[in-house]
Amino acid sequence: MNKSLKVLQPSEMIAGSTNRTDAWWKEPLLVVMVLGGFAIYATWAALQNKHYFVAPYLSPFYSPCLSANCADCTLPLIGKWWNLSPAFLILWVPGGFRATCYYYRKAYYRSFFGSPPGCAVRDVSKSYKGESAFPFILQNIHRYFFWMSLVILAFLWWDALHAFKFEGKFGVGVGSLVLTGNAVLLSLYSLSCHSCRHIAGGGLDVFSKAPARHRMWKTFTKLNENHQLFAWISLFGVALTDVYVRLLSMGVIKDFRII
Ligand code: FES
């Protein structure tokens, strides 16, 4: 054997190295831009503490509005002593739900942590231990975030119904459709969750003995096949709904009344 040639051990290979010749880095880069952009926008919108309500529309970033100081208080569980943005009282639930989502985990582990950056691309991080140790073992609380998100979702549907009421009378504005569309997309995202599918059909040995659960499991499985798609379009949906309410409240745009 030629002594000038050295066989590299796996530990000596360069982080992020690969024999792939396609542009595998495009997808992780896109995820960093979109997910990072959403996180920055959501934090900024939550910090604003204004322009989140214009009758009858309430931004989903502030719903349910739980502080007595809210511009449109849904449920005054927190007194006027709460001086921070009411968005911080509830955003941790949908934020935690998305952060621990099985699909997003794959997306941001690859994009932000480079673990691994792509198929057949070497891990950037040498210390990644999977989800078997702290802190990533905490991702297991996803199933509890699922239940809490259903509560938030119920309030978003309430907001969507409320968006058809103009000074006590039924009406339809573009905002009514925007809020309803947002509730539909978030329902698709939540009901396509892996935890939801497991709740419906998990732990069953014989489906024929639980036909109702089997039917639910088949429905949720169909939704689950598109979970990645619902994850992204509901992310855009919730951000655009906030943008719509914000621009209306600022007087930048006007709400077109259909009925
Ligand atoms: S797996 Fe994505 S929301 Fe549960």
Image (spheres, rainbow, N blue to C red):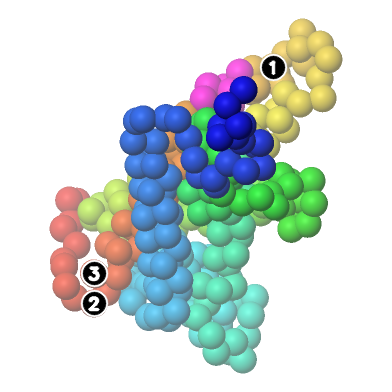
Q: Secondary structure at mark 3?
A: helix
Mark 3, residue position: 248
Residue 183 spot, x, y in % from top left: 44, 48
Q: Residues within 10 Å of mark 3 (few under 14, many from 20)?
A: many
Residue 195 spot, x, y in % from top left: 67, 37
Q: Is residue 12 rendered to the left or right of residue 119?
A: right
Q: Secondary structure at mark 1?
A: helix
**Segment tinted magenta in the rendering:** 218-225
* 115 or 232: nearer the viewer: 115
Q: Amino acid at mark 1?
A: His
Q: Amino acid at mark 3?
A: Leu
Mark 1, residue position: 214
Q: Is residue 84 visible?
A: yes
Q: Is mark 2 within 8 Å of ligand 1?
A: no
Name above or below for residue 129 compared with residue 51: above
Name above or below for residue 124 compared with residue 210: below
Say which residue appears at 56% left-offset and 59% top-offset.
95
Mark 2, residue position: 250
The answer to which image quadrant residue 37 occupies is bottom left
Q: Secondary structure at mark 2?
A: helix
Q: CA distance from mark 1 to mark 2?
A: 49 Å
Count of numbered tags: 3
Task: Assess whether residue 116 is covered by the magenta stretch.
Answer: no
Q: Is residue 226 rendered to the left or right of residue 176?
A: right
- The numbered mark, 1 or 2, whose residue comes first in the sequence reads 1
Say which residue appears at 72% left-offset and 32% top-offset.
199
Magenta stretch mostly in which secondary structure?
A: helix
